[in-house]
Image (cartoon, rainbow, N blue to C red):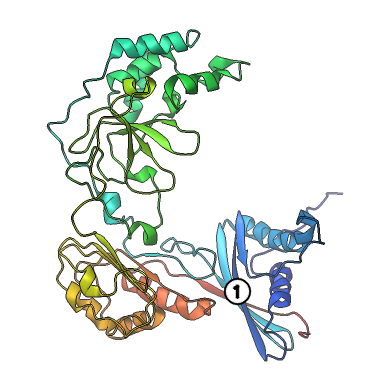
Amino acid sequence: MVDQKPSLPSMHDFATWEPVLRLLLASNAERHGAPAVRVAGSIGRHGWSLALRRRLPPPGRAAQIEDMQDEFDAVKRVQSALEDAGINDISFTAEISATGKTTLHLLAPSPAVEPGIGNPHPGALILVEGSLPEPWRRLPDPMPGAVPAPSVDLALLEQTLRERLPDAIGATETEIAAAEARLGVMLPDELKVLYRVTRARWEDWGDDYEAAERESAAVGCELFSLDDLYIADASSRHCRWEFAAMEAVVTPPDAAVQGLVGSPGWIAFGDNGGGDRLAVDLTPGPHGHVGQIIMLSHEESVGAELLADCLTDLVLERPSEHHGSCHDDQPPAVARVNIASLRSVEAAAHPGLEVLSIGVWEDEPLSLARVIGLPRLRTLTAYPGTLADPLEIAKLTGLEFLELGPREWRVLLDAGAVPRSLSAAAIEVRGGEDPLPIVAIANELLALWDRPRILQSVIEGNLGPVA
């Protein structure tokens, strides 16, 4: 007799979703006396976002896994169905009547739509396949006069490292050449000196677990092995479209480091122990040195901090002599108009403006007349209800990203006035709005660019009378 494996839950079986829906219904404080209740959420293979009121643990005890076991079990059932269907994440909304009759809408992911953050609404709509925000397309400006720092001292660097790491195993010339071939760039001389002293491979340390600490202390960072060196170009700094579109690349005339997302001349070789990457900079700013050492913060998406004028200085702990200005005298490329920042669109307008964000606003809606015709304006985001005339957007011919509320998008769609220059778009949603109308607008926008839509499927079932 052949043992039969239990069948996996199917994504389109109501029973798969019933435990999740019951938990959401129990957490909905407005369900009593209402003819129907709407619940929504999103579940992925590695996380979920559900508006649940979790039970408080007894006084004096921290929350335990068993306090949320019913939630874990309900979500796991859906996650198993996701895995079986080959889907990473899915959003849903359901309407539950007083009798328990339930209509569940599943919103399948589209390759043209980024997932929402903590809600079932769609994230950024990628209207042009493979498109990137302008800062992620920016390459370094040439600096033909840039030279290495005068403090570079290859002999001193090697002597210091060998004194600090007498037992280290260095890389061979063949291994260094292989790393250069993989990266597609010649390693600077200081970096070659470093790896000739130590190739920083875990297997070389054997059972000496303190060897890594000694090496970090000797070099000034957690050193990558030759095999782990990488080019810290823009693609290495991933950022969601709606956030990346709000950034701007700015390099002041006295800067040592170009204010880039990434550069083909940034060779990442280490970590500071907190997730920030150290790199050799071969494309410095106007007042920088070729081969200077910079740090790319894991909390920021643009720019880098100068740590040392060269690797020799980093190892010898010599501070940089560069002292740039603390700020640029030019008006900001990114301007925010709201109750706490700029108080008018006029105050934000100037020829170098790239990003205009209109946030929470308590006065009369604003006109965009003063930013029409600005040559570099590429991003506009406007909180729902803040624009006096959304059709003014049609005159902003250089926009590549636009984020508006549902009503403003409806005006543009009905008038056939959605800017065709857009590469991506987003719908600003307040609170717990029903996802279905938002998805409908998203699909209309995707259709204008003939992009894959968000597919919907409907499942009906019954949870029994709602108490």
Residue 416 lies in quadrant: bottom left
| Number of marks drawn | 1
Residue 379 % position (x, y): 28, 65
Residue 330 lies in quadrant: bottom left
Q: Residue at x 65, y 84 (%)?
A: 37
**At label 1, which amino acid type do we have?**
Ala
Count residues near mark 1 (Cα–Cα under 10 Å), then give few for <14, some for 14-19, many for 20+.
many
Q: Residue at x 20, y 60 (%)?
A: 331
Left or right of 323? Residue 89 is right
Left or right of 376? Residue 74 is right
Q: Nearer the viewer, residue 389 or 115?
A: 389
Question: To which residue does mark 1 refer?
Answer: 40
Residue 108 % position (x, y): 53, 67
From what the image shows, is residue 113 above or below residue 134?
below
From what the image shows, is residue 264 above or below residue 26?
above
Left or right of 86? Residue 330 is left
Q: Nearer the viewer, residue 389 or 132?
A: 389
The C terminus: image quadrant: bottom right
**In this rendering, does residue 200 appear at all?**
no
Left or right of 289? Residue 109 is right
